[in-house]
Image: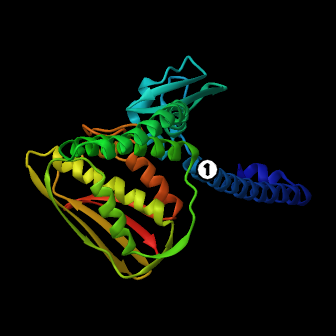
């Protein structure tokens, strides 16, 4: 301020000026603090928004007027090419991308677009399975009655056949048993698994395995070995026997699909702390498509209907266990709590 102006002011005016300057400085500090507080609040709000969009079960993008990304979550970052396939002119539709199905929703806010893509592959799969299961259950019911009649007639035929022809009837009975297994597995899969827990000795499963092998039709020369622990387990014995049956049949089929005329299958059991592991090893061909191993109605085998492993997984899940597979060495394993 000009010194002459200050000299021309009386004491009262100088005091008013000083108070005014002081008030201005104080107000500046207040504004500065408010700005800092607003900035901190904005940063905290942005952080909260970032955290919120990260927990959303969908890929989310926010685009500006030029369709450039200004914000996205990790799920969106993992699928950069998905956004390129989305039609931004639509507001709600389903999109198939990279063997998965997505529900696309697009909303606008002022000059911005909010795009989200929810993975609905499991829902689509369940819809497909429900539809296929309904048809399969109907067919299974239709097949069950004539198969029962054929089974009864084959038993009568076996009794009346000459000794030299009995092996032919036995092969017919094995084929009938296979159809019955498919029918029963289909009905069990579509109705759902209900576990009846009872205590039994694990070694009892060896008899179940040997009976299952005896009822299966195969040509390869296979060496079987079993190592079940002398241990009591509270589980559904008949359902676990069905799981082992499916795993053994898969192992037999894998050997028959290999170039060798012989092979080996080993069932091994071990206890680790409060868990029991049952492993089924085989020397057959490897797993071709690991993604669809437990997928219902899908199979790469020459024999089979694609239900065995899917049903087996349902059964082990119902026991609160784990059914999985290893590749080196190749085996399927069951993990159960004792």
Where in the figure is residue 250, as x and y percent of width and height?
Answer: 28, 50
Residue located at (39% from left, 32% from top): 99
What residue is shown with label 1? 52
Instruction: Tell me: 283 left or right of 153.
Output: left
- Using a 10 Å C-alpha cutoff, classify the residue at mark 1 as few (fewer than 14 neighbours), some (14 to 19) or many (20 or more): few
Task: Looking at the picture, tell me which residue is in the foreground, 156 or 6.
Answer: 156
Task: Looking at the picture, tell me which residue is in the foreground, 170 or 58.
Answer: 170
Q: How many marks?
A: 1
Q: How is the image coloured?
A: rainbow
Q: Residue 98, located in which quarter of the rendered image?
A: top left
Where in the figure is residue 219, as x and y percent of width and height?
Answer: 16, 47
Instruction: Tell me: 281 left or right of 206.
Output: left
Task: Looking at the picture, tell me which residue is in the foreground, 316 or 187.
Answer: 187
Q: Is residue 97 above or below residue 182?
A: above
Q: Residue 162, located in which quarter of the rendered image?
A: top left
SS label for mark 1: helix
Q: Is residue 301 above or below residue 112?
A: below
The answer to whether residue 61 is visible is: no
Residue located at (28% from left, 50% from top): 216
Where in the figure is residue 15, as x and y percent of width and height?
Answer: 87, 60
């Amino acid at each position: 301020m000009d010194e002459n102006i200050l000299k021309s002011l009386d004491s009262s005016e100088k005091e008013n000026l000083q108070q005014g300057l002081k008030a201005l400085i104080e107000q500046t500090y207040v504004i500065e603090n408010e700005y800092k507080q607003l900035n901190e609040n904005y940063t905290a709000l942005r952080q909260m928004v970032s955290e919120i969009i990260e927990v959303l079960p969908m890929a989310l993008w926010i685009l500006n007027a030029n369709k450039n990304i200004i914000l996205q979550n990790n799920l969106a970052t993992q699928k950069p090419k998905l956004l390129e396939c989305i039609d931004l002119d639509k507001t709600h539709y389903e999109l198939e991308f990279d063997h998965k199905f997505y529900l696309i929703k697009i909303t606008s806010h002022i000059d911005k677009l909010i795009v989200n893509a929810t993975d609905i592959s499991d829902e689509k799969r369940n819809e497909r399975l429900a539809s296929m299961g309904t048809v399969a259950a109907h067919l299974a019911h239709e097949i069950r009655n004539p198969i029962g009649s054929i089974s009864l007639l084959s038993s009568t035929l076996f009794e009346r056949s000459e000794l030299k022809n009995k092996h032919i009837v036995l092969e017919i009975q094995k084929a009938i048993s296979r159809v019955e297994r498919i029918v029963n597995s289909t009905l069990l899969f579509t109705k759902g698994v209900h576990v009846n827990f009872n205590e039994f000795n694990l070694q009892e499963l060896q008899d179940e395995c040997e009976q299952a092998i005896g009822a299966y039709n195969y040509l390869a020369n296979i060496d079987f070995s079993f190592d079940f622990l002398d241990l009591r387990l509270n589980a559904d014995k008949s359902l676990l026997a069905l799981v082992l049956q499916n795993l053994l049949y898969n192992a037999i089929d894998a050997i028959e699909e290999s170039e060798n005329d012989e092979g080996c299958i080993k069932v091994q059991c071990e206890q680790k702390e409060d868990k029991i592991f049952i492993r089924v090893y085989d020397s057959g061909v490897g797993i071709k498509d690991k993604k669809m191993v437990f997928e219902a109605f899908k199979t790469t085998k020459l024999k089979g209907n694609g239900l065995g492993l899917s049903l087996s997984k349902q059964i082990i899940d119902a026991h609160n266990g784990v059914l999985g597979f290893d590749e080196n060495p190749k085996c399927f394993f069951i993990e159960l709590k004792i």
